[in-house]
């Protein structure tokens, strides 16, 4: 029986990955530090067929012992939160970059023999997605929008040559990376370090570039998590979801069950030393997310999205996946549609207590000068 060590395996994504491995017959060990921002206590959803070790991935002795007993490393552990990473810089670098470096150092120094490594990467490493100028008939990779543009409410990108409005395209793995937050930089670090060590020491390694994940077990009390969880918490507490810009910015939402399956397929595939997008390939606007959740929570007519027309430093306009490489290399395609996945999230969310901490997080961003007014 193949044995897998899942770091961060008690978290939102990691726990679903654990369930997927257990269901497929793997011997699963989890290491997780149950960080306070995500967990109050040990979650009720933990899989009884996995072994749980409560500890920190930065504990060298602990990781040496755990890694020596497994065939596969699945590295999910990470400090998560784009906005928060911009003012808790040391924390994010310490957990994500240095934590991963320590794991890899243990593997090398202790000469640990692994059959495969899988690392959770992120679409955030791209910065803006890929665009197309119909007038110039050229692919474009615009940089972040300037403050002057954002203040004037000109949300869409323009072609640098002809000035025409650019059209978003599906973003392939070949798109140049332009990480626009500390979080994104550390995710790029994790991916690149693991692929580098995998190549150097002949350990087949796969980087999975997750797009916007949603589904049950998201920490609804955590205001630094994904937009679906943040909006759910607001709506459950009878507060309107706050939408930045005009709400027409788009993302690629993929259900956590599909993410879990992609991790299993990464281990079982013959692919090695590559990074692939894990997304649905379908763009969805933030307004559509807010409106769908309001409807599914039964709050239509009572609540409507609050369009702030403000903007956050580092935010991108459009990014959705070209998932063809994952299909080719891993045999992966998303199976859960947006509406179906949202129903699953809301069914779970109705049973959860959710404290709305959004205002506190928003005030922190404002105090740090990371929110601009239109």
Image: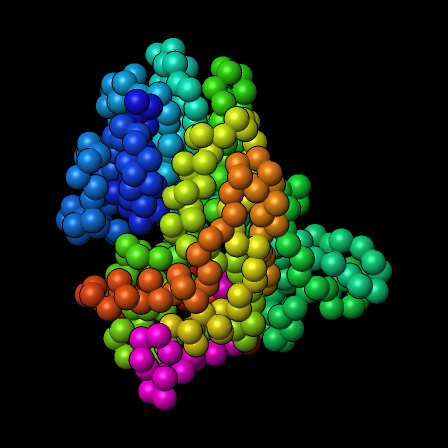
Q: Is residue 371 left or right of residue 168?
A: left
Asked if the stretch drawn in magenta spans residue 297, the answer is: yes
For residue 369, say whether it is visible: no
Does residue 1 sit above or below 308 in this rendering? above
Q: Is residue 154 left or right of residue 193?
A: right
Asked if the stretch drawn in magenta spans residue 284, the answer is: no
Q: Quadrant of residue 118?
A: top left
Which stretch appears magenta? 295-316
**How far across and how far down the image is residue 145, in percent?**
63, 62
**How far across and how far down the image is residue 68, in percent?**
30, 16
Q: Which SS does the magenta portion mostly show?
A: loop
* Front in this rendered view, residue 77 or 158: 77
* Front in this rendered view, residue 371 or 334: 334
Does residue 219 sit above or below 209 in this rendering? below
Does residue 134 sit above or below 334 in this rendering? below
Q: Determine the residue positioned at 32% across, 82% down.
A: 299
**How far across and how far down the image is residue 372, in percent?**
51, 69
Q: Where's the C terminus, which quadrant?
A: bottom right
**What coloring was used for the rendering?**
rainbow
Q: Quadrant of residue 346?
A: bottom left
Q: Where's the N terminus, which quadrant?
A: top left
Does residue 247 sit above or below 47 in this rendering? below
Q: Determine the residue positioned at 24% across, 68% down.
A: 350
Q: Determine the residue positioned at 57% across, 35% down.
A: 329
* Front in this rendered view, residue 294 or 85: 294
Q: Determine the residue positioned at 61% across, 50% down.
A: 322
**How far across and how far down the image is residue 39, in percent?**
21, 50
- Which residue is outermost to the bottom? 301
Q: Quadrant of residue 25?
A: top left
């Amino acid at each position: 029986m193949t044995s897998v060590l899942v770091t961060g395996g008690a978290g939102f994504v990691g726990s679903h990955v654990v369930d997927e491995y257990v269901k497929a017959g793997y011997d699963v060990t989890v290491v997780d530090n149950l960080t306070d921002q995500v967990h109050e206590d040990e979650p009720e959803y933990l899989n009884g067929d996995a072994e749980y070790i409560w500890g920190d991935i930065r504990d060298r002795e602990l990781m040496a012992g755990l890694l020596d007993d497994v065939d596969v490393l699945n590295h999910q552990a990470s400090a998560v939160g784009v906005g928060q990473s911009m003012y808790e810089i040391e924390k994010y670098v310490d957990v994500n970059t240095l934590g991963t470096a320590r794991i890899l150092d243990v593997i090398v120094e202790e000469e640990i023999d692994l059959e495969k490594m899988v690392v959770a990467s992120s679409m955030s490493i791209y910065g803006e997605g890929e665009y197309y100028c119909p007038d110039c008939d050229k692919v474009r990779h615009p940089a972040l929008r300037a403050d002057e543009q954002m203040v004037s409410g000109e949300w869409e990108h323009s072609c640098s040559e002809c000035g025409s409005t650019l059209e978003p395209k599906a973003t392939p793995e070949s798109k140049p990376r332009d990480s626009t937050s500390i979080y994104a930089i550390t995710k790029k670090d994790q991916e690149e370090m693991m692929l580098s060590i995998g190549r150097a020491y002949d350990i087949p390694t796969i980087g999975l570039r997750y797009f916007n994940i949603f589904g049950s077990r998201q920490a609804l009390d955590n205001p630094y998590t994904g937009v679906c969880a943040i909006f759910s918490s607001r709506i459950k507490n009878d507060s309107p979801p706050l939408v930045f810009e005009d709400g027409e910015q788009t993302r690629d939402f993929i259900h956590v069950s599909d993410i879990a399956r992609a991790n299993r397929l990464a281990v079982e595939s013959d692919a090695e030393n590559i990074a692939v997008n894990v997304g649905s390939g379908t763009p969805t606007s933030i307004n559509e997310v807010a409106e769908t959740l309001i409807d599914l929570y039964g709050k239509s007519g009572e609540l409507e999205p609050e369009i702030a027309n403000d903007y956050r430093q580092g935010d991108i306009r459009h990014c959705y996946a070209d998932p063809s490489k994952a299909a080719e290399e891993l045999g992966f395609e998303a199976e859960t549609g947006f509406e179906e996945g949202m129903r699953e999230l809301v069914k779970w969310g109705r049973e959860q207590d959710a404290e709305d901490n959004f205002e506190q997080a928003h005030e922190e961003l404002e105090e740090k000068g990371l929110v601009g007014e239109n």
